[in-house]
Amino acid sequence: MEGRPLEATPSTEEVEDSRLVELARQGDAGAFGQLVRTYQQVAFRVAYLIAGDAADAEEIAQDAFLKAYAALARFRPDAPFRPWLLQIVANEARNRRRSAGRRAHLALRAVEDQRMAASGDAAPSPETAALAEEQRQTLLEAVNGLRDEDRQTITFRYFLELSEAEMANALGCARGTVKSRLSRALGRLREHLAARGPRG
Amino acid sequence: MADQTFMLDGDLERALLDLGAHVAFPATPDLTARVRVRTAETRVTPARRGWFPSGGWQRALTVAVVALLVLFGAALAVSPEARDAVAERLGLKGVTIEHVPELPMPTAVPTAAPSAAPAAVAPSALPVPTATTPPPGSTLGLGQRTSLVDARTQASFPLLVPAELGPPDAVYALNPNQVSLVYSPRPGLPAAPQTASVGLLITEYRATIDQQLLFGKGVPPGGRVEEVRVGESRAFYISGAPHVFFVRDARGQVVDERSRLAGNTLLWEHNGLTLRLESALDRDAAIALAATVR
């Protein structure tokens, strides 16, 4: 399967993060700023997928970084920064989620945007290239139709490509249950797709 | 529609990854600057003392005082849309000029809160005035008194000072996005009657996304607003009859206790900050002084 591995292994990014965290603990604001720059997108998106609102997500992500900074003294230097940060983001987002009914309604990028993005990317695999716009739309509607937990599990894993540890932190579950949750969510997604039936 | 292809795990997962690459997430805001300034505060004042009795910076961020309005002449109820439109015309961040027929009446000049004794919590490089000598500008509703050192660490932006005047005689912070520097009268800085006889009042605002409070200025018909330049920046000089200075809350309502009459005022922008200089100086002297604020 493509994408970021579910089973995380210490990466060069983590080594660099540890260095930056250590510098930040010593008061190097620039080092923390680099961590913010690196992770603000994933932090914002995790917040968005939980909170369902871009303005809320912005505030959540910002506050999560500030909380992370304030808690750096308690952070184990050898622990990976990203999963820890995403846990703070997810907790913050859940605490502040304004209404249970609110959820991000994901949509596809405009075709023109996709073309521009694709032209700058490596060539997609034949399988992905073959997926028509309509198929994507159908799949996205099915994802949007899932209940919150399944939807977050699917989007964290496949849209944000979180690792197992990050998934556990962001979902607020034990690491050992991530795979089973993912499997259940995929199962329900298949049910949704099957229920929609073949179209066109 | 070949939904059947999703029935295989590998295909479904591949399709989801592909889908993820085509989903339109909202644009990620750049948080680095905002987090940087807030973390600077966290590092220096981990105990979270200072401007906000409770709730700390979270409230400060959402109740950010960020904008200036220049109000010509009486209706205070101006729609946000109108504000935006005029703000665009001015091209000066956080500053709008509203055209209204009459000047609103200011409320009484506020007095300094008795509890504002921040010298105790703000170790200052400045001499601490005795109880019988109120610090200059303490009646202007500028916020809590602090020191230049603390203001620098607590403000959400790099604080600017007029290079040639040296440290101010008093510093006030209303919140991390608004800091005021007050200078006592001295040769070249005559006392300004509208600012409780201080020589110079410089207020620095950082405009943010959360524009919950807006500063207002009501300029009477006798007042004059000129477009000028401070260095490379577009600027506005308000002179003539005293105008009203007030604060709006998030709903656009005027917060009465901070309304007051204001004297000649220069508004300009520097490094993303909106600055307001109030003094008895004439236009050119005010512009010359503003150019030294770095």
Image: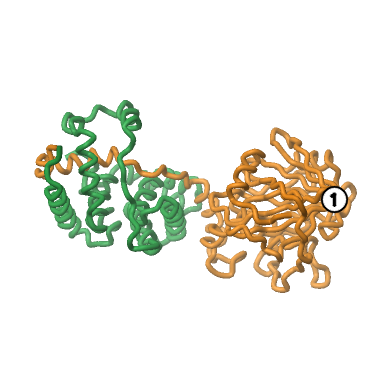
Chain colours: A green, B orange
Instruction: Determine whether, in the image, residue B177 is placed left or right of residue B280.
Output: left
Q: Amino acid at mark 1?
A: Ala
Instruction: Determine whether, in the image, residue B10 is placed left or right of residue B176.
Output: left
The subunit letter for the residue under badge 1 reads B
Q: Position of residue A142 (x, y in %)?
A: 21, 48
- B45 and A131: which is toward the camera: A131
* Res. B168 in view: yes
Residue visible at 66% across and 64% down? B122
Q: Residues within 10 Å of mark 1 (few under 14, many from 20)?
A: some
Report helix, strand or loop for mark 1: loop
- B25 and A140: which is toward the camera: A140
- A36 and B96: which is toward the camera: B96
Q: Position of residue B281 (x, y in %)?
A: 85, 46
Residue ID for mark 1? B241
Q: Locate the C terminus of chain B by quadrant.
A: top right
Residue visible at 48% across and 46% down? B32
Q: Position of residue B197 (x, y in %)?
A: 85, 58
Residue visible at 75% across and 39% down? B291
Q: Position of residue B143 (x, y in %)?
A: 69, 62
Q: Is residue B135 above or below residue B235?
A: below
Residue visible at 60% across and 48% down? B207
